[in-house]
Structures are given as C-alpha cells and as structure tokens.
Image (tube, helix red, strand yellow):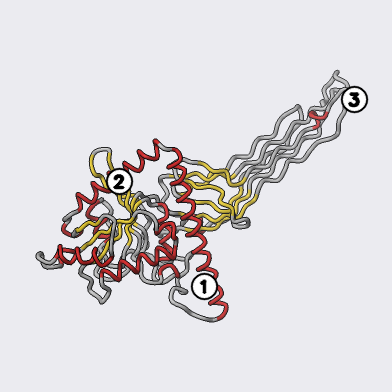
C-alpha cells in the first residue's frame, strides 16, 4: 500500500426532512384537527480516528461523501426518520482543514476520537406544531434546513515521541532496526527510505516510546530539494530530535558540514522546531580505527561548540544503544511528569506544537505556490517534478507501528 499523507475531499451533510401538512380523518370524529409530524434531522459527517488505518490513500480514489437526509414527516403525528450519520475513518494523527476558510477544524490525536466536520440539517416542523386556541386548523409547516457542506484538506502527521533526522545514509534506518522491531529498507545508496517508518522501543516492561525515521535530508530540503519538504512536517509532533551523523562518510560531506546543513534546513522550515531539544548521535564508529574514535568525536563536538547530549554509537553492531534508549526514556518520563504536575507547562507545550504546525504549513504552502508560479513561467527547478499529491511508486509502504 502506498503512503499518502495528504488528501482533499468534499463532504455534504444530509438535509433535514420537511414537516408534514395533514389532518386527522376518522369516521365519527369530525374536525379531527392537525396531525402532521415533524421531519427527521439530516445525518452529519463525522471523522473518526481509527487505529486500523495508517494512510489517507482511500481518500485519493473517492473524494465526495454525502450523509443521509432526514425523511419527511407523516400524518398521525409520525416523525420522519433521522438520516444516518456518515462515519469516515482516518488515521490517528490527522489534522483537518477547511480549504475555503483555511480554518483548522480539529486534530485527531487519539484512537476513536470523533470530529463532526459537517452538521446535518435541522428537521422541519409539521402543522401540529402550529395549532393554538386561535388557530385550530393550521396549514403552516416549515422545511428542513440544508446540511453543511465543506471542502476539506486532511493532513497526516505521524505520532512519535522521538524523531530521527540526518543526511541520507547516516544510518537512521539501521538505528531504528536495531532498537525496535521496525524493518525499513537498508541499502548502500542515498534515499533508501522513501516514507516515514515508526518503531516502538521497549526499554523495560511497561516502558516504551515511539521513534520515527523520516527520509534523509539534504541542503535545500526546506525549499523542496530531495524528499525533505514532504516529510519535514512529520517532525513537528515529536518531542525530541536525535540528529544521526555519519562519522565515516563515503563522500566529501564532513560530519561538521552535515550537522550544520541539517540544522540550517530545520531552522528555515520551522524556527520553533529548531529550538526543540536535539541530541547528537555519532554513528558508524565501527568504521573508524578504534584508537581514533574518541578523539574524532571529541574534535567534532569541540568544533561545533555543542552543548547538548552526545552519544557515540555503532547502530549496525548495536554498540552504545542501551544508554541512548535509557536516557531517552528517562527524558520523556520527566517531561510527562512535569506537564502532569504543572498545567501551565502542558499548555505551553501545546502552544509550541500548534506554532510548529503553523510554521510547517506556511512553509509548505509557500513552496507549492512558488512551484506553481515557476511551472506557469516554464521554469524548471530541482524538486518541481515531485508531486506532493501523486505517488506512483509501487514500492511505497504504509506507516506502521512496529513492536
């Protein structure tokens, strides 16, 4: 199955049923009076976050959805049947936008969470509702109201505690394979990873966190180079970034340049994301002479003037991974405990996440607009052949939480 993280659909709620104009007609009961019933309410369109769905691919092939309308009222004060609500399943982590107003309608971040995106129409009233002491035979009814209609954009952002970032071939996929049950493709060429991969890292019983491996970034990723502009947005929901660095690169890109280049791209994409906690993970030390490993790492930390945590590992040999995973779990637990005790801290974290999502959305929209303008002008630039909405590669896989 292909990984699809954006889709546009239009939804239409059901119309409310009209009220009925009717009078009681029975033998031996003259002037029976009005008995027209109300119509039924129209059905609403409801999005439900489901755990069994991992992509938005279904909404690429069917984009029009309509809920059932309410039935008209009947005589003998019979109310029309209500229209059935239309429930649409989307992946956990889906943000819903109104395309026409650019309003954020909701964020489905928990399993079974529901969001009404189009409210069904209200039922019409039958003539029974209008009878009074001065109006014994009302012929007045009301029509049901129209249901809401919206054009929606659905955006899926993976839900993970930790995000892995780095240059292509830095060893991110090998790292996630070593610390979790996720099995992303690993090969000796750039951009092996084409879609985000998620893995559940179990540190001990009842202690685990989710890590996300996104495709490798290159210089210009924030402007659309490589695969970055499509997948950088998945990092905005992570709480901690692990910057994986290849300490034995096969090309001319030095570890120092790789760290600075990725940091610059994150800053351009979202300054708020760049301010998040980021740990340096120096990988592939097994490719360096054993007596030089510590000195090479020390020199890099010194030249970068790095103040945050640093971990020296070899993902392929599973060296140095236990301390890394233990410290990540401890950091996450401390953050969760602090937010549980301090409501203001939790609100500040939520505000940061919303700010990152806004910056990411603005950046992506600016990229798309610039690309359209270049296409209209007949100017071709790197990244312009990459369609954010049409993935035709048969080997693209769905995002799954591998445990």
Which label was assigned to residue 331?
2
**Left or right of 369, for residue 141:** right
Q: Tell me the element at label 2.
A: helix
Q: What is the quadrant of residue 44 in the picture?
A: top right
State the image coordinates of residue 332 (x, y, percent, origin top left): 32, 45
Pointer 2 or 1: first along the chain:
2
**Disc 3, disc 1: CB below 8 Å?**
no
Q: Tell me the element at label 1.
A: helix
Q: Is label 3 or label 1 in front?
A: 1
State the image coordinates of residue 19 (x, y, percent, origin top left): 76, 36
**Residue linked to disc 1:** 371
Q: What is the quadrant of residue 133 in the picture?
A: top right
State the image coordinates of residue 263 (x, y, percent, origin top left): 36, 64
Which residue is at the front of the view, 110 or 77? 110
Furthest toward the bottom, the residue is 378
Q: Residue at x 52, y 61 (%)?
A: 362
Furthest toward the left, the residue is 291
Separation of residues labelled 2 and 3 (CA atoms): 74 Å
């Amino acid at each position: 199955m292909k990984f699809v993280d954006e889709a546009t659909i239009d939804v239409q709620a059901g119309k409310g049923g009209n009220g009925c104009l009717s009078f009681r007609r029975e033998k031996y009961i003259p002037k029976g009076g009005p008995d027209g019933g109300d119509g039924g309410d129209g059905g609403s369109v409801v999005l439900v976050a489901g755990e069994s769905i991992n992509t938005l691919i279904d909404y690429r092939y069917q984009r029009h959805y309509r809920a059932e309308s309410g039935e008209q009222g009947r005589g003998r004060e019979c109310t029309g049947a209500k229209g059935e609500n239309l429930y649409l399943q989307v992946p956990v982590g889906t943000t819903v936008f109104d395309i026409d107003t650019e309003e954020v309608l909701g964020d489905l971040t928990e399993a079974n969470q529901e969001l009404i995106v189009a409210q069904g129409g209200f039922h019409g009233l039958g003539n029974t509702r209008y009878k009074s002491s001065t109006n014994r035979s009302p012929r007045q009814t009301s029509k049901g109201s129209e249901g809401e209609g919206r054009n929606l954009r659905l955006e899926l952002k993976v839900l993970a505690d930790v995000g892995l970032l780095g240059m292509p071939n830095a060893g991110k996929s090998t790292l996630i394979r070593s610390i979790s049950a996720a099995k992303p493709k690993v090969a000796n060429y750039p951009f092996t990873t084409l879609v985000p991969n998620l893995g559940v890292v179990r540190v001990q019983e009842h202690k685990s966190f989710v890590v996300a491996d996104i495709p490798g970034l290159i210089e210009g990723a924030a402007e659309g180079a490589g695969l970055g502009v499509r997948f950088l947005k998945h990092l905005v929901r992570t709480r901690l970034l692990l910057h994986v660095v290849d300490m034995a690169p096969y090309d001319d890109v030095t570890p120092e340049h790789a760290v600075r280049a990725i940091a610059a791209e994150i800053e351009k994409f979202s300054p708020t994301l760049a301010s998040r906690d980021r740990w340096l993970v120096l990988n592939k030390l097994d490719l360096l002479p054993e007596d030089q490993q510590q000195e090479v790492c020390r020199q890099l930390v010194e030249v970068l003037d790095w103040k945050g945590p640093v971990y020296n590992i070899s993902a392929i040999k599973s060296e140095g991974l236990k301390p890394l995973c233990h410290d990540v779990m401890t950091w996450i637990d401390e953050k969760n405990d602090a937010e549980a005790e301090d409501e203001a801290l939790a609100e500040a974290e939520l505000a940061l996440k919303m700010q990152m999502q806004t910056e990411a959305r603005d950046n992506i929209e600016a990229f798309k607009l610039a690309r359209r303008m270049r296409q209209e002008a007949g100017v071709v630039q790197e990244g312009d052949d990459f369609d954010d909405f049409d993935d035709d590669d048969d080997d693209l896989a769905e995002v799954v939480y591998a445990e």
